[in-house]
Amino acid sequence: MEVGAGAAPHPDTLPRSGDNSGVTTLDQLLSLRSGGSVSTATSEVDPSGHVVVDVQPTADDNDDGSTTVDDLICRPAVHFLLAFDDLTYNVKRPTRSFNRSHRIQRESLRGAVTLNGDALDSRLLRVISAYVMQDDLLYPMLTVAETLMYSAEFRLPRSLSTSKKRSRVQALIDQLGLRAAANTIIGDEGRRGVSGGERRRVSIGIDIIHDPIILFLDEPTSGLDSTSAFMVVKVLQGIAQSGSVVIMSIHQPSYRILGLLDRLLFLSRGKTVYYGPPAALPPFFSEFGHPIPDGENPAEFALDHIRELEGTQAGTNDLVQFNKSWQEKPLSRAVSSASTSPLGKPSLSLKEAISLSIARGKLVSGTSAASTQTAATAEVATYANPWWVEVWVLTRRAFTNTWRTPELFVLRFGAVVVTSFILATIFWRLDNTPKGVNERFGFFAIAMSTMFYTSADALPVFLIERYIFLPETAHNAYRRSSYTLSNAIVAFRPLVILSLAFTGITFFAVGLAGGAEGFVFFALIVLASFWAGSGFVTFLSGVVPHVIIGYTVVVAVLAYFLLFSGFFVTRDRIPGYWIWFHYLSLIKYPYEAVMQNEFGADPGKCFMRGVQMFDGTPMGKLPVATQVTVLNAMSKSMRIDFNSSSCITTGTDILAKQAVDQLGKWGCLWATLAWGFLFRILFYVTLLLGSRNKRS
């Protein structure tokens, strides 16, 4: 097990080739064999100062130089040499105060990274390694066992049966000491769940479910009490002893934790001030002229002394130089045993080492022990499962989590029902007069806007899930496309319920036209509106960084959509330089669809007869008899035969007057659905761009 303690190196000060203090340490730190200790190792320095520590098994290759899988399985150890040569990159600092994350600038990574002498790309590293972040990013309403089981379904090969995956989870629960909490939810600020130490062990568990070859951990004991921290490191020691390379950073390890560690690495401003076993700390500082007092924690003394030196003008330069000379002394001071090996040549090729690890139970993505006969030449799969399995697992996990957090849906359902009830009572049984026509316009505009405004509740969902999504996809647990499809599936089911509720309450109460066919179409366009609104808000959740900003954008944009929908100003009255916004308006298409469903259902239906043409004008205040007299006079003057019962305006006339004549109602329905799909595609694009270079 490896530990980096003290001042962490800044990304901009990564050591280059020729800087012995930095490069030597990185190589030594990352060149230890599985199991957390070193056997038969040598250290040599090439002319550039690059130091390589290679750990070899004691068995020899075949006489002809070849190595078979059977030979590999018989060997006592699997050894990996991870080396960095002249590795540098640039960091993009956040420009916004609310964004504290740093990102590696695209195409800025320079240098060579090799594993057992073979060039190592980031894809393969993600497959054979795991990285446990400092923060515990877990779904609060899933139990410990469910959290680990879903991780197993993502990361373990499809060739393993469900029963074997479940057995692996149960064994891991015991290994992590989580048996008593197996059926307890993770919990959050509002729901009591497992303890902080148990949460940390669950976080470790989801990343080691596939038994990775290399495990990196960022301050796994941060925020834990002494007992919980010791239990976490004890678990990590067991993982290392089971055959994994475990490397972690830790600050101020206790005396008990220090006794569990195999190697320590102290860094100061990106340079190595000590590397070696904890037991070598007292003689190291004693020879440096600052002996550690009896009874004092060696790690705490070292950290305090490093801090003191950093405050001086010379800094830690003397300690860095002393560490270089210390490393050149007999190798037994830095490692437990030594032998000779050619510089930089590992005992096993990368494919052979991976094959041997698989043969011994490592569950590399897409491969199992049964396939080790060809593993030495086969490509390691990027993902453990096909996309449809990922979608199925993601969907089940999301349904489980949302089923146990019904508050969001209940609030949204309540908002839709209350809005429907208010609209139904205000627009109760509209008649077919000109006044009823205008009131229908208002009902349709408000009703279609409701579909989009009530979709805003989907905004915080991904903003919360984002921090779980990023590390999971960084390690290829599933594809981004699978998450996008699953997200759409999970979001669609409640939309059906909301659509039926809104339609059932308002359609007959308002007295809309079309009968059963009109009811079905109205329900479909309401569903399509919910779908488009949900897609729009989901897309925004992948773009905006904060919930408050997201809500502000949603309200503002939807207000513009309503303004240009054709309700306030008809299409033929919108200025040419704004007409593009009319066609981009999400409310335009459902609004025109319900207009046609209402006024186009029966083309001969009349909405204005005889003297009704005077409604809303000064003539409307005259007695009816006077209005009839005026109407007759108009008929004679215009030589058109109409009277008080003649139809003046039909539904077709209303649609023409409102400039609703470009698309039919079904065309508007398909356009609304298309918007929903388009925004889901754009959401997928934001996932691709937003998660790039988060981890290389």
Image: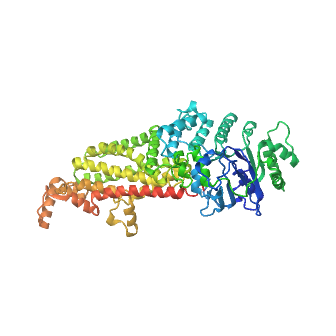
- Front residue of 250 and 215: 215
Note whether residue 142 is visible: no
Q: Which residue is farthest right?
A: 289
Q: Position of residue 155 (x, y in %)?
A: 52, 46
**Which quadrant of the rendered structure holds the N terminus?**
top right
In the picture, measured across the screen, residue 514 lies left or right of residue 71, that is left
**Which quadrant of the rendered structure holds the C terminus?**
bottom right
- Front residue of 56 and 47: 56
In the picture, measured across the screen, residue 689 lies left or right of residue 526, that is right
Q: Which residue is farthest top?
A: 180
Q: Position of residue 107 (x, y in %)?
A: 60, 64
- Front residue of 302 and 564: 302
Q: How many marks?
A: 0
Note whether residue 664 is visible: yes
- Front residue of 594 and 23: 23
Say if 568 sits above or below 288 in the image. below
Residue shown at 30% from the left, 43% from the top: 504
